Amino acid sequence: MELLEACHDSPLFLRNLMACFQEVILVTDGEGNILMANEAAEAILGYAPHELNNKNLSLIFTPEDLTYFYPNLLELTRKGESFQGEVLLVKNDKVRFFAFITLRPFDDHRLGKSLNFVCIRDIHAQKQLEITSAETNYEDLVKVANGVAHELRNPLVGIGGFVKRLSDKCNAVPEHAEYYDRIIRNVKKIEIIVRKVELLAKLPKPSFRMEDMRAIIEKGVQPYLSVLEKRKIDLKTLVDRATLKLDGELIIRIFSILIENALDAMPGGGSIVVHGVTNENHYKIAFSDTGRGISSEDLPFIFNPFFSTKADGAGIDLSVVKRIVERHGGSIKVRSEEGRGASFTLRFPLERRRAIRNSRI
């Protein structure tokens, strides 16, 4: 109790106490007007403590958070509720950084007013390290694969050209022609694998825009309709309309890969069902086929780069699918039994931000 009284009775004592903290400590009134700031504000926010006096806390929030998020934080404190979480804030030089912010309301009965205590911890370096660490192993593998693909491309072109010339010159011997044909077919297979590795390594970051998911799915399956009909594969699409923020071209690529995999799994015909539905805060797509399925031993590994259940495959396609889905903030799971088909479930967020960021409390 003596410490609390000392803080209240001696502004100098309180100021020295606050200077000991490495985090930014702010005191605001109920409207967010800053009454006090400690010295860490200069190191982290770029403002000397006196520069923040009588300024509003909104000064350090991004413009996109001023419509809903910041007013909602103040509303929470008016209701006596606290907030803790990661946010993107803005420094004096307009540089954005990740921070962990704590907002706690306090009713000062001596002054007869409501105050807010704000603590801001700079976690930008930590956040970047987490992101880098999460992708390091995968990125290293992709870089190695891309290097190998690059080194293979030129020799393959040369081998293919020379074999074709030898074939043209030696076509007088029938059994030799068969050998050359096999070599050329296998060179083409390797070239396809090289292209897929380069696709995985150079997959572009999503270019987000609002898209109609039903239109995207219809566009994705359209190029395969004649092939499906010829192969006697029945396609059913039961898709709800929903507008999501995503990269349409990358999502179409997902459906191209899933359909091509289904075609490989159903050489004698079968059926494909694409079911899309809005479910709470996400859009769920179930892509099912009646193909040969995947064994329980292989299921845990099918999204790993270069793992394949096919004797002549490289297992890259499903890695691309997973990478695209995750870059959209979504998830993908698979259920399958050998001989009974496979079902891929993709989930995409309808809104990437929490409710506190996109609507008023």
Image: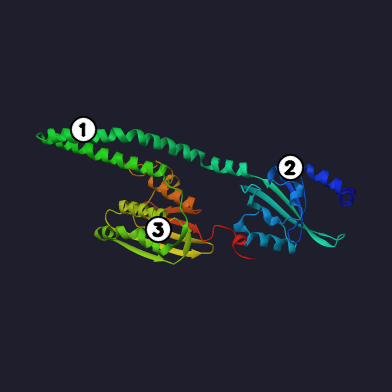
Q: Position of residue 196 (x, y in %)?
A: 36, 43
Q: How is the image coloured?
A: rainbow
Provide the residue designation for mark 3. Answer: 287
**Dot placed on the residue nearer the N-terminal end, 3 or 1:** 1
What amino acid type should be assigned to the residue bearing mark 3?
Phe
How far apart marks 3 and 1 lie (CA) works out to 43 Å
Give the residue displayed 24% in from the left and 59% down from the top. 230
Q: Residues within 10 Å of mark 2 (few under 14, many from 20)?
A: some
127 lies above or below 109: above
Provide the residue designation for mark 1. Answer: 162
Give the residue displayed 71% in from the left and 52% down from the top. 102
Q: Please state if 216 lies on the left or on the right of 157 as rendered.
A: right
The quarter of the displayed image where residue 315 is located: top left
**Residue placed most toward the observer, 5 or 197:** 5
Give the residue displayed 48% in from the left and 40% down from the top. 138
Q: Position of residue 95 (x, y in %)?
A: 61, 47
Q: Please state if 332 lies on the left or on the right of 60 as rendered.
A: left
Provide the residue designation for mark 2. Answer: 22
**Dot placed on the residue nearer the N-terminal end, 2 or 1:** 2
277 lies above or below 57: below
Closest to the camera, between mark 3 and mark 2, is 2
How far apart marks 2 and 1 lie (CA) works out to 68 Å
**Residue placed most toward the observer, 333 or 99:** 99
Q: Residues within 10 Å of mark 3 (few under 14, many from 20)?
A: many
**Residue placed most toward the observer, 209 or 34:** 34
What amino acid type should be assigned to the residue bearing mark 1?
Phe
Q: Position of residue 18 (x, y in %)?
A: 79, 45
The quarter of the displayed image where residue 179 is located: top left
Closest to the camera, between mark 2 and mark 1, is 2
Question: For the residue labelled by badge 2, is the local secondary structure a helix, a strand or a loop?
Answer: loop
How far apart marks 3 and 2 lie (CA) works out to 51 Å
